[in-house]
Image: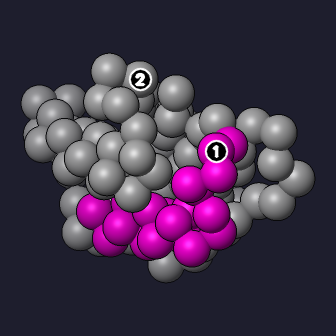
Amino acid sequence: MPSLIIYIEENLDRNANFTELEGVEHKLIQTITKELEAKKDNCQIVWIYSKILTSKYKVFGELKFRDTKNRDDIKKEKCLEKIGEILKNKFNVKIRLRSFAINDSLITALDL
């Protein structure tokens, strides 16, 4: 049930249309399925264009998933790093990501 919601500064939409995002989405799903040991059919990726007024980070992502004994802090961090690199290569802007598991009180965050 991993769900990745990506908020993109609306001014960046000139650099990415949805047909171009299919390849990025494929890489993101591969990363999530590998790093979090998730089923591909359960992965969701949502792209949201929005106005980001005060942050220097022009792409913001939230990764949510069910907590399992296999998904430790190291795997969560590694997954975020790989997602961050994919998004940074695509958009070439500062990225802010965070992840959290349902039934988990710890939030893992990454800024690039």
Tell me if mark 2 has few (under 14), some (14-19) or many (20+) residues whose alpha carbon lies within 10 angstroms of its own.
few
Residue 23, numbered circle = none
Q: Amino acid at mark 2?
A: Asn
Does residue 52 show up? no
User: From the viewer's perspective, is residue 104 above or below residue 47?
Assistant: below
User: Which percent across, then down, holds residue 73?
Assistant: 64, 68
Q: Work out which residue is located at the far top of the displayed protein and give it.
A: 41
Q: Is residue 1 left or right of residue 17?
A: right
User: From the viewer's perspective, is residue 57 above or below residue 8?
Assistant: below
Give whichever of 12, 32 is nearer the camera.
32
Residue drawn at point x = 64 percent, y = 45 percent: 68
Residue drawn at point x = 58 percent, y = 55 percent: 71
Q: Amino acid at mark 1?
A: Thr
Residue drawn at point x = 52 percent, y = 27 percent: 1
Which quarter of the figure has residue 92? bottom left
- For the residues labelled 1 and 2, say whether their Cβ atoms are less than 8 Å apart: no
Tell me where the magenta segment starts and ends, as one range.
67-86
Circle 2 SS class:
helix
Sequence-first tag of 1 and 2: 2
Q: Which residue is mark 2?
A: 42
Q: Which residue is mark 1?
A: 68
